Image (cartoon, rainbow, N blue to C red):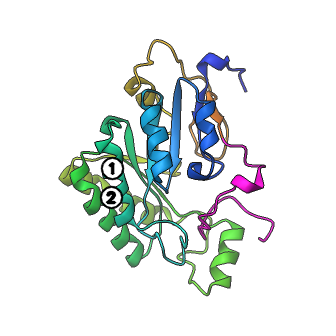
Amino acid sequence: MEKIDKSQMVGITEASEVSFNLDVFDRLYDANIIITKRLTNALIDKLVQNKDKIILHLTVTGWGGSELEPFVPSAEITRKKFGQLLEKGFPIEQCVLRIDPIIPTEEGIDRMLGVLRLFNDTGIQRVRFSVLDMYDHVKKRFKEKDIALPFDTFHAPLEIRKSIYDLLVDLGLQYHFDIEACAEPGIESVSCLSQKDIDILGLTDKIKLIGNKGQRSNCGCPSNKQELINSEDKAKQCKNSCLYCFWGSSKD
């Protein structure tokens, strides 16, 4: 992996839920991708205070409060908090709606559609998605909760994922969303950190994206990406308890 100068690094919060890790705002880079499912008042204030440095990925799957996301706020609550964020001056151009993951079942698609309808009037343009990946520990969690596995393979069958992508593209034309797939094999994907993000933040001439982080298969994120959260600090680990989370735990 090519060595990246600190001035070229871009922060990201993938290792845990950022609302439990507000100290990351003390060590931001010039550009940062902040990913969250919980728009708390304290997080909203931090985002607004540092808005010139941030692209926000707001993850809303429609499963908040369910057995799959027991401690995640509902989509309706998150939509209300998102409105408050915009009212306080966070730029809509720097916001990405992230439906990640989509559960490829009839109910999962219905919940996805509900999220799109809920956020249609916000002015948000970018919608990112991925389809559930069945890690071994995720299969175990589903079985322990007596939840039927939507498929047996690691990735959902390509024809299912393509049908979801095609549906989203059609809805994007209707709702004026730009659809971005995240690390979906067989489907053209856009990395969580892309040139579009750098351009939106006005850093085109300052930050040059280099190489490939090699984080996981089909992930095209460049080597500039730098995790902001210290995931080894157990007190700050995610408390959302999402059943499908790709991060395993000592209990799995």
Question: In the figure, 103 relative to 10: above or below?
Answer: below
Q: Kindly report the secondary structure that dominates the magenta region of the rendered protein.
A: loop
Residue type at tag 1:
Gln
44 left or right, relative to 22: left
Task: Using the rendered image of the protein, determine whether residue 190 is visible from the camera's viewpoint.
Answer: no
Q: Position of residue 132 (x, y in %)?
A: 53, 64
Mark seen at residue 84: 1
- For the residues labelled 1 and 2, say whether their Cβ atoms are less than 8 Å apart: yes
Q: Residue at x 72, y 62 (%)?
A: 248
Q: The magenta stretch spans which residues?
A: 229-252
Task: Using the rendered image of the protein, determine whether residue 225 is visible from the camera's viewpoint.
Answer: yes
Q: Residue at x 32, y 58 (%)?
A: 80
Residue furthest out toward the top = 205
- Quadrant position of the C terminus in the picture: bottom right
Q: Which residue is mark 2?
A: 80
Q: Residues within 10 Å of mark 1 (few under 14, many from 20)?
A: some
Q: Circle 2 — which element? A: helix
